[in-house]
Amino acid sequence: MVIAIDGPAGAGKSTVAKAVAQSLGFKHLDTGGMYRIVALAAVRSGLGPVEAAGSIRIDAGPPLLMDGEDPGDAIRTPEVTAMASKVAGDVAVRELLVRRQQEILAEGDWVAEGRDICQVVAPDAEVRVWLTADETERAKRRANQTGESVEEVLVAQRLRDTADEGHGRSTLEAPEGALVVDTTGLSPDEVVAEIRALANRLRD
Ligand code: DC
């Protein structure tokens, strides 16, 4: 079974996807992490996005591996985050990674998170969820993690949400037919319970 989770930055995708996977005994696929690994390879090598993507091997894990090693927080730096948004706008890189993601998801039980999972990578997933939250709440969550001001995060978040649209990505709007879960004011546990209940209903 595949549970597909889309949504904008700060909606809680990663926390929720990991927790749903753990509670159901599924594996977790962080597709944003795959774009980040390509970005890290580009930053380190100075190669262009497609060449960088072709120069490394990504294993699904979890954890995601870059040439057999866990890149850890090296893929979460501001420089790599900015480069990830750039490489994710490259059509050839997207084709490569979407194909790899589809191969990975073809076997076993997965919770896959990203921006294009519901529409492009796994349109036939048994469970398709679009997680969202009020933009100020999303910015507050990020500001709490990074120590930046909410205003600063809001500006960067708007830019990133716009940059991360297109190519079948549902950053700003829900994909058709997906269950919309607004996480504003909800605890991660409440969101996880809602998705689990849906998955369990479909499995019965
Ligand atoms: O979710 P994230 O911040 O880790 O994603 C990193 C970048 O990759 C971000 O700019 C959005 C982009 N991305 C994408 O275009 N498609 C995906 N399936 C996942 C992420």
Image (tube, grey):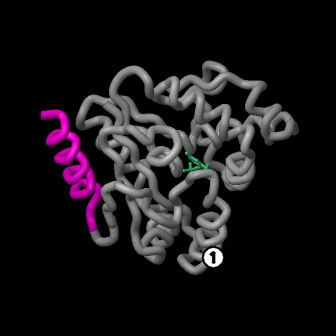
Q: Is residue 39 left or right of residue 112?
A: right
Q: Identify the residue position indicated by label 1 in the image.
A: 155
The picture places residue 183, in percent across and down from the top left corner, at 33, 65
Q: In this view, does 12 lie to the left or right of 40?
A: left
* Label 1 beta carbon within 8 A of ligand 1: no
Main SS category, magenta section: helix
Figure quadrant of the C terminus:
top left
Residue 79 visible to the viewer: no
Residue 182 visible to the viewer: yes
Query: Eyeballing the image, is 61 above or below 32?
Result: above
Say which residue appears at 46% left-offset and 69% top-offset.
138
Say which residue appears at 50% left-offset and 64% top-offset.
142
Q: What stretch is highlighted in magenta?
A: 186-204
Query: Eyeballing the image, is 127 above or below 182?
Result: above
Task: Give the SS element for disc 1.
Answer: helix
Q: Which residue lies furthest to the left in this view?
A: 204
Tally of marks: 1
Viewer-nearest residue: 144 or 160: 160
Viewer-nearest residue: 123 or 143: 123
Q: In this view, does 125 lie to the left or right of 9?
A: left
Viewer-nearest residue: 74 or 21: 21
The picture places residue 42, in percent across and down from the top left corner, at 79, 39
Q: Which residue lies furthest to the bottom in this view?
A: 151
Figure quadrant of the N terminus:
top left
Say which residue appears at 17% left-offset and 39% top-offset.
200
Which image quarter: residue 3? Answer: top left
Q: Indicate the amino acid at tag 1.
A: Val
The stretch drawn in magenta includes residue 191? yes
Say which residue appears at 58% left-offset and 27% top-offset.
100
The stretch drawn in magenta includes residue 157? no
The picture places residue 101, in percent across and down from the top left corner, at 53, 31
The picture places residue 46, in percent across and down from the top left corner, at 87, 39
